Image (spheres, rainbow, N blue to C red):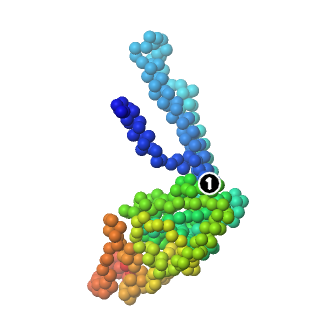
């Protein structure tokens, strides 16, 4: 029986850490390797200051304590030392310069929008990643297939990600392969990664997004070229097709969604996802911005509010259950603005665009 409190504490700590994965310090891809190198270099540079400070924090109180046997080195007239000033100011300045140079180099080298063509690692694989509640959708536009909560990639070839979100802001994170980039509704971001060798690497959302966040995970399966081609062939054999209708059904909030594949993908689907206009009758974000630039729809456009509404249909409660909100009443808005036109953007202009979300 364990009786020592220290032993109990050590056992509890070991148990708590038994599930930890040190992917950041054990990279499996070129991008992750460069990020690890930056972390190590920055840590070592900062230790140049930290280690001496820790040493002096112990040494000086002991060396110059009031009851020391020999106090002949005490100099009550001491006011300044050029050597000490050079060390105190010069070393930190050099460290900051070194950190700045290293950070500048790695910031441009690891720009997530910068492709990996410089590696000469073959033809990249294009992947369109969509953050849903609470699952990940991966579309392979060149291959005509898609998968849910499973990312298959060929080892040794770059992967070009285009990311977006159907609802809230989220983050695609595969720590073993590289850093994370946000996926945001109505926007497209990019990320470029590569796996050095075959393996299965944990992927997840790294941005809290509600009750299903903890289960918003997926496996990244890096395969040999033959295995990847076999995976694509198996996905193509799936009878399910990813169309606008099936996407809208998939988009509904679910927790713990199983892995599934789609044998075909409707052309232009990702562009509609980014534009928030997958549903029939919805105005795409790009068209909405153009209309705003041209002056908007004015009061006559209020009747078309449902075509611009997106968030209402995706409202959920704190447990992830959809909320059935009443439809907006354009007539009420119209009457309110007719009564007080100054409410329109605070200017009194009746030409302003009215978009109800």
The percent coordinates of residue 203 (x first, y second) are: 51, 58
Query: On the rendered image, what quadrant is the N terminus found in?
Result: top left
Furthest residue in direction bottom, as rendered: 300
Dot 1 alpha-carbon crowd within 10 angstroms: few under 14, some 14 to 19, many 20 or more: many
**Which residue is found at the position 43% from the left and 22% from the top?**
61
Given residues 135 and 89, the one toward you in this image is 135
Residue 260 in view of the camera: yes
Would you identify the image quadrant in which residue 207 lies?
bottom left
**Which residue is found at the position 53% from the left and 71% from the top?**
261
The percent coordinates of residue 276 (x first, y second) are: 47, 76
Query: On the rendered image, what quadrant is the C terminus found in?
Result: bottom left
Q: Is residue 187 above or below residue 282?
A: above
User: In this image, 97 relative to 61: left or right?
Assistant: right
Given residues 218 and 74, the one toward you in this image is 218
**Which residue is found at the position 53% from the left and 25% from the top?**
81
Residue at the spot of label 1 = 29
Q: Is residue 222 above or below residue 90?
A: below
- Secondary structure of residue under mark 1: loop
The percent coordinates of residue 222 (x first, y second) are: 61, 59
The percent coordinates of residue 3 (x first, y second) are: 34, 31
Given residues 269 and 104, the one toward you in this image is 269
Residue 293 in view of the camera: no
Total tally of numbered discs in the picture: 1
């Amino acid at each position: 029986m364990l009786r020592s409190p220290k032993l109990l504490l050590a056992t509890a700590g070991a148990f708590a850490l038994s599930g930890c994965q040190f992917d950041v310090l054990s990279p499996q891809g070129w991008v992750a390797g460069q990020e690890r190198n930056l972390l190590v270099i920055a840590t070592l540079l900062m230790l140049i200051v930290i280690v001496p400070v820790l040493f002096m924090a112990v040494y000086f109180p002991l060396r110059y304590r009031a009851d020391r046997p020999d106090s002949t080195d005490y100099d009550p007239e001491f006011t300044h030392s050029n050597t000490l000033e050079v060390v105190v100011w010069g070393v930190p300045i050099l460290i900051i310069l070194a950190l700045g140079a290293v950070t500048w180099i790695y910031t441009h080298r690891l720009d997530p929008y910068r492709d990996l063509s410089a590696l000469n690692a073959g033809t990249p694989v294009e992947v369109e990643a969509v953050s849903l509640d609470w699952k990940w959708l991966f579309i392979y536009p060149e291959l005509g297939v898609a998968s849910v909560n499973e990312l298959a990639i060929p080892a040794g070839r770059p992967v070009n990600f285009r990311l977006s979100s159907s609802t809230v802001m989220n983050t695609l994170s595969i720590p073993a392969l590289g850093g994370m980039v946000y996926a945001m509704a109505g926007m497209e971001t990019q990320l470029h990664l590569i796996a050095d060798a075959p393996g299965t690497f944990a992927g997840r959302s790294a941005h809290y997004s509600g009750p299903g966040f903890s289960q918003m995970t997926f496996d990244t399966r890096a395969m040999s070229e033959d295995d990847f081609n076999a995976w694509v062939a198996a996905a193509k054999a799936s009878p399910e097709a990813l169309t606008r209708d099936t996407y809208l059904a998939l988009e509904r909030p679910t927790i713990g969604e199983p892995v599934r594949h789609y044998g075909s993908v409707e052309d232009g689907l990702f562009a509609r996802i980014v534009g928030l206009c997958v549903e029939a009758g919805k105005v795409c974000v790009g068209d909405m911005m153009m209309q705003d630039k041209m002056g908007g729809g004015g009061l006559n456009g209020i009747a078309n509010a449902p075509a611009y509404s997106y968030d209402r249909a995706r409202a959920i409660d704190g447990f992830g259950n959809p909320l059935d909100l009443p439809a907006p009443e354009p007539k009420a808005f119209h009457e309110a603005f007719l009564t007080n036109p100054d409410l329109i953007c605070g200017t009194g202009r009746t030409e302003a665009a009215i978009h109800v979300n």
